[in-house]
Image (cartoon, grey):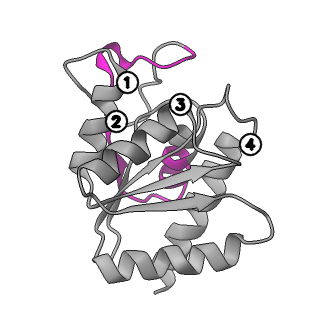
Amino acid sequence: MILQKIISGGQTGVDRGALDACLNLKFDCGGWCPAGRRAEDGPIPARYPLQETHSPFYEDRTRQNIESADATLVLYNHKLTGGTLLTYSIAKSTHHPVFLFQVSPFFIESTLDDLFRFLETHQIRVLNVAGPRASQWDKAYESGVLITSRLIQKVQQG
């Protein structure tokens, strides 16, 4: 199996959707979060197996997750903004493999196929999943759960 673990930062939206998909499917997960388990809705719940950075800043958590992974998957809706754009920019500037996944109901299957090939080509074992927080995109959590669940199922099927 190529993919062995998914990590994320624990923010509301895509991050928690990805982690919940892993927990629901009993797939190894983790990642880094800001000191104090800081998120837009208060402390990140303890059920998420995250390590705290020494810093309360989101950017430091983002860098740590990128560096801890073999590649980063960035989910987004229409365009990259805020922390999602920052994640993409850091991954590109540090020459870490990054896969942009624009979530559209018309292209989910074909984009999942492309993502699976990306994982195989780059031999990705640890994947960082990132994207908008819940306050920036009303479908962020749902998209994180859906795409991560489908990816895990595809990996497990071979």
Inter-mark Cα distance, 3 to 1: 11 Å
Q: Which residue is mark 3?
A: 82
Identify the secondary structure beneath mark 1: helix
For marks 4 and 2, the one nearer the N-term is 2
> What residue does disc 4 label?
139
The region drawn magenta spans 18-41
Amino acid on which the number 4 mark rests in the picture: Lys
Does residue 133 lie above or below 117 as drawn?
above
Residue at the spot x=27%, y=27% of the render? 60
Q: Quick check: marks 3 and 1 in contact, CB under 8 Å?
A: no
Label 1: which residue?
58
Q: Which residue is mark 2?
A: 62
Query: Label 1 vs label 2: CA separation?
Result: 6 Å
Task: Determine crowd level at label 2: few under 14, some 14-19, many 20+ residues with C-alpha closer than 10 A.
Answer: many
Residue 157 on the magenta segment: no
Cβ–Cβ under 8 Å for marks 4 and 1: no
Task: Report the Cα–Cα distance between label 4 and label 1.
Answer: 21 Å
* SS state under label 4: loop
Q: Are marks 1 and 2 in contact (CB under 8 Å)?
A: yes
Observer-nearest of 153 and 76: 76
